[in-house]
Image (spheres, rainbow, N blue to C red):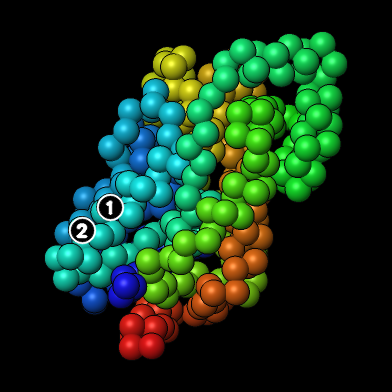
Amino acid sequence: MEKIFIVVVCGATASGKTRLAIDLAKRFDGEIVSADSMQIYKKLDIASAKPDEKEKDGIIHHMMDFLEPTTPFSVADYVPMAREIIADIHSRGKLPIICGGTGLYINSLVDNIEFDDTGSDPSFREEMKRLAGEQGNGAVLEKLRGIDPESAARLHENNLSRVIRALEVYHISGKTMTQIQAESRLNPSPYEPCMMMIDYDDREVLYERIDRRVDIMIENGLLEEAREFFTHDDYVTAAQAIGYKELKAYFDGTAELAECVENLKRETRRYAKRQLTWFKKDIRINRISSSKSTNYEEILENAEKLVKKYSIL
């Protein structure tokens, strides 16, 4: 089966990947498929740094702004939907460009991960919740460690829902989550990816970009967007978005705005660090070096060279 050539522009928040993906789409007649776990939601515009119509510059964006914030959405939902969209883009002779900073979405898509379709056992799940309530989350994690030490090593006891799910999968299927994940990688990927990220030689340059972005978000109405967000108790999944929870203390009257904004900048920098740690583990990702003195045109030129190189391999 002939593989579909795709471009993946990934990396840390505020690194410039949105602009780069749009310019590559203009250069190579592409359409963009978002790989951002928060840009999928309607109304979360400023906090998720969702590009507006002017920034999109006529380029079609998929997997963005289509879901109500009340709707849970996971990587298991993302991958089959993105696959279908990529196939459609390719069928029309366009270049699919995946752009985003959610590493789990990107790797699961590119590596063709199949997710377990094991059913559920509500009574077993309740039993594990009772165990956690009586003996602590650590007791549930310890139970998993005796069955699936690899999964237990990857999970924190505070991530109770995933620990319970791993136990539930074994309870129902007799297979560990580690075994199921290994089997899910047996099918080859349908993609031939050209993966890239803008990598700042000096981390402080990226952090300065993050600080500036937060200031711009505040100027553009982040406070109003966050205030509206907190009027909805049912925005459960979307509550993970950085940009809202850091401002809650201001709305509650327990902290000054300046303090909350500094906290938002700090948490965004920490998030960027986690993203970089994730992406730098993947040796397939080409790093486009950038510094304070780098001209954006140089970055774009290097990205274009990568696309041309990989498209003829």
Helix, strand or loop status at disc 1: helix
Looking at the picture, how far across and down is residue 61, in whole percent?
A: 25, 53
**Res 21 seen here:** no
| Image height of 198 relative to 57, above or below | below
Asked if the residue under mark 2 is in contact with the one under mark 1, i.e. CB atoms within 8 Å, the reply is: yes
Looking at the picture, how far across and down is residue 3, in whole percent?
A: 34, 73
185 left or right, relative to 303: right
Image quadrant where residue 289 sits: bottom right
| Image height of 3 relative to 262, above or below | below
| Image height of 1 relative to 305, above or below | above
Question: Residue at label 1?
Answer: 84
| Image height of 137 relative to 292, above or below | above
Looking at the picture, how far across and down is residue 102, in whole percent?
A: 50, 51
**Res 36 seen here:** yes
Quadrant assignment for the C terminus = bottom left
Distance (Cα) linking label 1 and label 2: 6 Å
64 left or right, relative to 165: left
- Measuring 70% from the left and 14% from the top, which residue is drawn there? 127
Looking at the picture, how far across and down is residue 233, in whole percent?
A: 46, 14
- Measuring 44% from the left and 17% from the top, which residue is drawn there? 234
Helix, strand or loop status at disc 2: helix
